């Protein structure tokens, strides 16, 4: 099994190269290559998860150079669980983008540019999850960022170029900060192997260690859109095409969260920064959800809820307990799927009506009942309505906070409950205006120019919706619901994952046992 660890990284890169070589020709073959590549990645990721859950972490050395000298890829419970969820989600998004391209008869550009960039980004995400070396983690971030730059500015519209410029500046800033942290780490320890750093940090000067921890946390806070490093996200993500926005929202910020989980558990367990992380989690929850409540555009509302719910994950990490970390892992898995599905449904709404402004929408419940259901289910899941996985994830974090006790954890528990209620209010406002409200001044299926009583437009067009497009979105919504059905096994896996992370020895022994 060790020989297939690199497959989730190398296979998308190979497929991207083949698709670039083909160019705009053989369109159906290109679509098949993309879907098959991600389907194989899903299968390989599942096999790796089963193997490491049964037998512990596995390691493969790239180029034949064992750790700590060479670069290694490490598959443990956390990395393989993230691989399974991310590859499953990206498979649905890829199917959505293929159908969307053919429905709009925009074959050449998506096949020649969009999909190769998408595959490169996915390879970067997989490399980040599997990386056992800080420099390779930096390379993984650059790989996924290079693909995301293309996707964000795809089409070359003014709004996308402007958003892409902001996103690029933030990406470059975080990359430079990451390089600065790597220089400090190597100067202080002589290695960038994560497993070896876990050993050498134990004897490192406390002030140098604190500087390294804060620099790395700041780097990943920018990438994860943690407050106050989150202002760039609501202005960047909503401008991209629907498939790109969906995978950005679902995955890219979670790579930053994954990096924080990995490094805090392995390199800085029980460090002095935990209290700072709690304050950051509190601010991220409240600022994000208050921004969501104030929005009238569905994409921007979802972007702000994305920021606020990152706070739940940071809260779990900050508790520095197995229970808290298990809650964070469960919530990451839930949020990747639910947030992605909501952005895909928003893409359907925009395709159906030509708008995502709730002030200009109305009557979608009657005009498009399937889209209404596809929005309602993940929206309630995101809000934490029982017995959905969003409720179960928040419940696990609340229980972890109550078990920890103390003023700050209890304040975060209260903030988490308030955030959940305000999230429900934000999505209910969208539901009431866009779906439940009757079109102002005309029947469903008509384009209404204005409503004199409110000064708003209410639009419901009659644009045809391809069945496969609805099917790809429904599959992702069903995946999110499956976490409710499989909540017991998933919670147990999250607890085993957290226990393995907090133990540290399984990871360190798996890597250094081969290189020393």
Image (cartoon, rainbow, N blue to C red):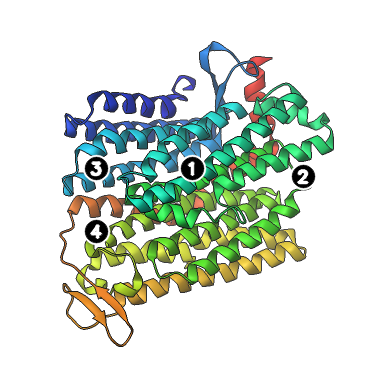
- For mark 1, what is the residue? 168
**Crowd tier of the residue under label 2, counting other residues whose Cα lies within 10 Å: few below 14, some 14–19, many 20 or above:** some
Look at mark 4 in the image and give the residue it sits on: 351
The answer to whether one can see residue 494 in this image is no
Percent across and percent down for residue 60 are 53, 20
Mark 4 or mark 3, which is nearer the start of the sequence?
3
Q: Which residue is mark 2?
A: 271
Secondary element under disc 4, as helix, strand or loop, is helix
What is the spatial separation of the Cα atoms under label 3 and label 4, in whole angstroms? 15 Å
Tag of residue 98 = 3
Quadrant that contains the C terminus: top right
Q: Residue at x 63, y 16 (%)?
A: 514
Could you give the CA–CA distance between mark 1 and mark 4, rounded to whole angstroms?
28 Å
Which of the numbered marks, if any, corresponds to residue 464? none
What residue appears at the point 69 percent right and 34 percent down from the top-left corner?
504
Q: Give the SS element for disc 1.
A: helix
């Amino acid at each position: 099994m060790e020989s297939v660890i690199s497959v989730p990284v190398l296979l998308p890169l190979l497929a991207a190269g083949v698709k670039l070589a083909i160019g705009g020709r053989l369109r159906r073959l290109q679509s098949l290559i993309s879907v098959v590549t991600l389907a194989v990645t899903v299968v390989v990721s599942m096999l790796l998860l089963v193997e490491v859950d049964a037998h512990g972490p596995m390691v493969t050395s790239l180029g034949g150079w064992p750790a700590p000298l060479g670069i290694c890829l490490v598959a443990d419970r956390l990395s393989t669980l993230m691989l399974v969820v991310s590859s499953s989600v990206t498979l649905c998004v890829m199917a959505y983008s293929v159908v969307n391209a053919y429905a709009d008869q925009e074959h050449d550009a998506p096949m020649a540019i969009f999909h190769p960039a998408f595959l490169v980004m996915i390879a970067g995400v997989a490399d980040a999850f599997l990386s056992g070396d800080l420099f390779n983690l930096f390379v993984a971030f650059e790989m996924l960022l290079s693909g995301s730059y293309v996707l964000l500015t795809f089409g070359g519209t003014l709004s996308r170029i402007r958003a892409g410029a902001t996103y690029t500046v933030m990406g470059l800033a975080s990359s430079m900060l990451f390089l600065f942290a790597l220089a400090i780490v190597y100067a202080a320890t002589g290695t960038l192997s994560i497993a070896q750093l876990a050993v050498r940090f134990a004897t490192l000067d406390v002030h140098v260690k604190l500087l390294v921890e804060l620099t790395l946390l700041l780097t990943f806070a920018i990438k994860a859109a943690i407050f106050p490093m989150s202002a760039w996200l609501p202005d960047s993500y909503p401008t991209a095409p629907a498939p790109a926005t969906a995978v950005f929202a679902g995955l890219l910020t979670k790579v930053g969260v994954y990096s924080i989980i990995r490094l805090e558990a392995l390199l800085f367990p029980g460090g002095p920064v935990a209290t700072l992380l709690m304050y950051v989690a509190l601010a991220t929850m409240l600022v994000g959800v208050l921004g969501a409540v104030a929005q009238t555009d569905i994409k921007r509302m979802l972007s702000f809820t994305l920021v606020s719910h990152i706070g739940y994950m940071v809260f779990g990490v900050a508790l520095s307990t197995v229970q808290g970390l298990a809650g964070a892992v469960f919530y990451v898995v839930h949020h990747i799927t639910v947030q992605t599905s909501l952005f895909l449904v928003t893409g359907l709404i925009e395709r159906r009506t030509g708008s995502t402004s709730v002030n200009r929408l109305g009557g979608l419940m009657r005009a498009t009942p399937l889209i209404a259901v596809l929005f309602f289910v993940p929206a309630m899941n995101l809000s934490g309505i029982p017995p959905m996985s969003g409720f179960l994830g928040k419940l696990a974090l609340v229980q972890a906070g109550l078990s920890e006790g103390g003023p700050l954890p209890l304040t975060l528990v209260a903030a988490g409950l308030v955030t959940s209620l305000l999230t429900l209010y934000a999505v209910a406002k969208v539901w009431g205006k866009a779906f439940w409200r009757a079109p102002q001044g005309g029947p469903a299926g008509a384009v209404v120019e204005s409503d004199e009583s409110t000064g708003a437009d209410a639009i419901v067009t009659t644009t045809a919706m391809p069945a496969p497009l609805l099917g790809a979105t429904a599959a992702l919504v069903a995946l999110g619901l499956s976490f409710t059905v499989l909540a017991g096994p998933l919670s147990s896996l999250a607890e085993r994952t957290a226990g393995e992370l907090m133990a540290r020895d399984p990871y360190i022994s798996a890597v250094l046992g081969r290189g020393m």
